[in-house]
Image: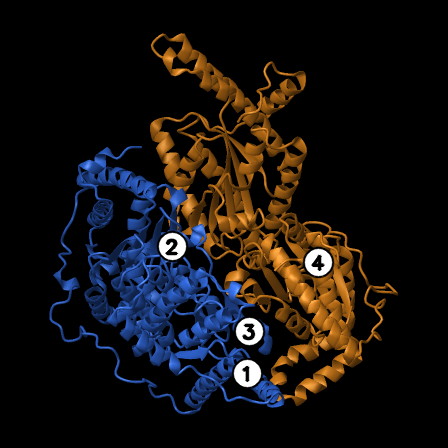
Chain colours: A orange, B blue
Amino acid sequence: MHPPLDVPLSSEVAREIKRAEKLFAGALTTEALSKKKLRDAETDLREQLLELQTRLRDADFNVLVLFAGVDGAGKGDLANLLSTWMDPRGIETRAYGALSDEEAERPRYWRYWRDLSEHGQIGVFLSAWYSQPLLDRVYGESSPEVLLSQVQAIRALERTLAEDGTLILKFWMHLGLEAQKQRLEKLEADPLSRWRVTRKDWEHWTMYDRFVRTGALLIEGTTAEAAPWHIVDGSDGRYRGLTVGRVIRDALENRLDEMDARRSTPVETADSGEPPTVPNATGRVVSVLSDLDLGRTLDRQGYRSELKRLQARLNRLHRLAREQGRSTILVFEGWDAGGKGGAIRRIVPALDMRDVRIISIAAPTDEENKHHYLWRFWRHLSRAGKVTIFDRSWYGRVLVERIEGFAAEQEWRRAYQEINEFEESLTEHGIILVKFWLHISQEEQDRRFQAREEVPYKRWKLTEEDWRNREQWKAYEDAVDDMVRLTNSPTAPWVLVEGNDKRFARVKVLQSVCDVLADALGVSETSDLEVRH
Amino acid sequence: MHPPLDVPLSSEVAREIKRAEKLFAGALTTEALSKKKLRDAETDLREQLLELQTRLRDADFNVLVLFAGVDGAGKGDLANLLSTWMDPRGIETRAYGALSDEEAERPRYWRYWRDLSEHGQIGVFLSAWYSQPLLDRVYGESSPEVLLSQVQAIRALERTLAEDGTLILKFWMHLGLEAQKQRLEKLEADPLSRWRVTRKDWEHWTMYDRFVRTGALLIEGTTAEAAPWHIVDGSDGRYRGLTVGRVIRDALENRLDEMDARRSTPVETADSGEPPTVPNATGRVVSVLSDLDLGRTLDRQGYRSELKRLQARLNRLHRLAREQGRSTILVFEGWDAGGKGGAIRRIVPALDMRDVRIISIAAPTDEENKHHYLWRFWRHLSRAGKVTIFDRSWYGRVLVERIEGFAAEQEWRRAYQEINEFEESLTEHGIILVKFWLHISQEEQDRRFQAREEVPYKRWKLTEEDWRNREQWKAYEDAVDDMVRLTNSPTAPWVLVEGNDKRFARVKVLQSVCDVLADALGVSETSDLEVRH
């Protein structure tokens, strides 16, 4: 099961160990205290933590405390201690074992996203997203390159959460290499305890060395200003609670004071620096949308036969995808009255509704508002082999939220990257993703609004908001331009649909879904005709 | 695998078949129409359904359409058809395969509760809770008695939903016994198709007979005014959509009209009959609470040693329960400042926080408000081997909601039964359930309110609501009395805790948790000392 141990040590490994030792030498310890003083210090700390927890309750951010490190270094004990010290109703501990089948069928981080705590709460995560990268590498089941990509993914996740306000505090529980060695040698030196030291112990100790080195790499790779590591001496049983508790106290107090200060000063923009650079569409002469030829049409005859052909093709591809356990996500964005609903209704008959969910995205619920804006989309990810159709989506962040000012400039500007990373975690998992923008001209929109007012059962579709959005046409054009340019990729393509002619639009949508599916499933247009029942 | 087929038919079975035939003879069909007229009828129906769906969108109830019956009778096709006819964004189809491990670790109906649609939506359920009872009985894996208890559980579920306003429409897709037989005989009579009829087909046809009989029993057992069955001839491929669609249209229209009418008439109580009889506490001389001796105390010395002993005992029992995959739910109710938080904090140190969740129940979120009030508790049920502590709970329905009038009298009166059934489904699944009422005197509450006002970090615990609740003391006493009398059972016991002395109360809570756990796990007080690590 284990790969060959690297004994004797190569010079490179020796260097790595040196670096790890240096890193862990800085492990936090607290000065030695008398029993009485220790108890007093704990009592003070607990009172402070309780008071801070009270203040946190009404704050609009959450706290994420993460314990990682060697097994047996006290991660679980610390989680229990914190729950005992604080009001346990405001603190949740999350540990992770083997993936449940529901978890295995979703992208890697789904199990963590669904566990993220609400604003005002403290979530204590044990190992969590650090466990797999560490174990895989230690057991030689992943290469340094894979570890690196895992580190990148972790950085992205933690940055995403931190930028949304999550206070992230990471503690690496360390047990010294030398301390461990000395302990074994001491046992061996004593005839009465020699029997307790087996070959296996030394083997583990050597593995342990790999743990420490890999741990050091992980720590170095995932250290960030907004997600710092604190290395704690795990052997330091009496003080480690005090040590960890004080770090939490100081960080939480700082943050809460900062929030209070911000609230009491006039609201400028509390930007911590330059907003991420986004090539802004303003001033551009030609936008991606203006390239579209809205004159394209399809006659009734052609429409009928294409519709029939493509729905049959989609049905076959859908069944093939289901067999392979590949899920599909279709995102529909577009102008009001752009024909999203109609396009979706032409897709639905080709699918088995047992495998389909249509998620209409409107204003977030209050529960959703207490989380990162992507949380509500993570929770809708399906099990394997399903089709999820989003009628509006996470792109609301860079469209309506940008334009109406529901999101601060910082927020929508960083959303492009967040979205790209989110979609990457979908496609990495094997999910097939296609995104549609249904484009129409302003004149066509007018005609459709008019028509809707005349049909009673379509009138509900027309709201005041539609008219207001109508006035923001130019702003939306710019936003769409940025969106398409910044979030288009081969694995998560945007399909811009010329929508003035409904027949043309619907066929183009169907055709695109089929093409992307066929491509992802590795079947050609002709061969997918032969997909078996 | 199959039990011996009952051929030749016994007279009892023959009678059952007769009844089934009679039942299914009434299968709904629509008059034969010309192709043109059929198309026109469909177009009309679709428009009507779309319009009703629009009205439904803002209504405060949901629609549950259930298709059950023989496989191959068109359940899936009908679900697909409905999604095509209506706005697919307002209709969700749910099919159920093998249990996922997450589902298997929760009570039977958990998978359905999590899928129930929100107000304004239509949920189409395929087979759902009818599948298991039907298959188990047909394959001889359950007795008639088990089938009966399953029928009772279904009736309870559907009644619970219907009383909350869910419009339930159930369709049993039938394929006639004779029709099927004739089809096989006809094939056999023709030399060119004889080869297509195998022994297996006839065997299935005989099984089919069991399907039909069991189906009839299920239908008869689960027919209710608020959850009626409509039997549809599944062989009637061209008309069954029209048939089903019209039933849905009529029922939905009736309900929406009824709601509109109710809204426009002055709100009396729209009770549909006598409220369920609840022995009312008013006028009683002795309530369950007045039996409690609030003078009971425990000295500091005894408290310390008992606390230590019981926490150690609880820790052992908790680990044993985890090993056995048994979950525990602890419910805490009580007067404001009654000591719920303190009692919980004395339990927490005995547990491994990796296995614990504490759910504080406050006002429901908007998402929760769009579902049955029990939905929010179903969603918090844990996987196997966990401990869930509810700080306030579903009993809010018969306490604060009853007293403040947030629930109508009908609603809180029927809640006792709903709660009993809910708790039964928990304990049936093997969940260990204990419920605590922390009782204090009014004078003690005064003292505690006072004390809270003096400690800064405890002040948040005291709200205006607390003072208002204070004035409702008598009303709460009556409500607690009803609650305890009506929801106490050996498997879901209430423990009334004399809470004036905090030490006494905390020890009693711990002791009770331990006793119930030990009893459920089948270990005696002495033997649970020997639980291994």
Q: CA distance from mark 1 to mark 2?
A: 36 Å
Q: Position of residue A331 (x, y in %)?
A: 66, 63
Q: Do residues under tags 1 and 2 come within 8 Å of each other at their CB atoms?
A: no
Residue indicated by mark 3: B90
Residue indicated by mark 1: B49
Q: Residues within 10 Å of mark 4 (few under 14, many from 20)?
A: some
Mark 1: amino acid:
Leu
SS type, badge 4: helix
Mark 4: amino acid:
Asp
Name the one closer to the observer, B153 or B277.
B153
Asked whether, in this view, residue B390 is left or right of residue A64, the answer is left
Numbered circle sitting on residue A528: 4
Asked whether, in this view, residue A62 is left or right of residue A391, the answer is left
Q: Residue at x 37, y 63 (%)?
A: B463
Q: Do residues under tags 1 and 4 come within 8 Å of each other at their CB atoms?
A: no
Q: CA distance from mark 4 to mark 2?
A: 41 Å
Mark 1 and mark 2 lie on one chain; the one further toward the N terminus is 1
Residue B378 lies, with reference to residue A112, above or below; the image says below
User: Share a chain, discs 3 and 4?
Assistant: no
Q: Do residues under tags 3 and 2 come within 8 Å of each other at their CB atoms?
A: no
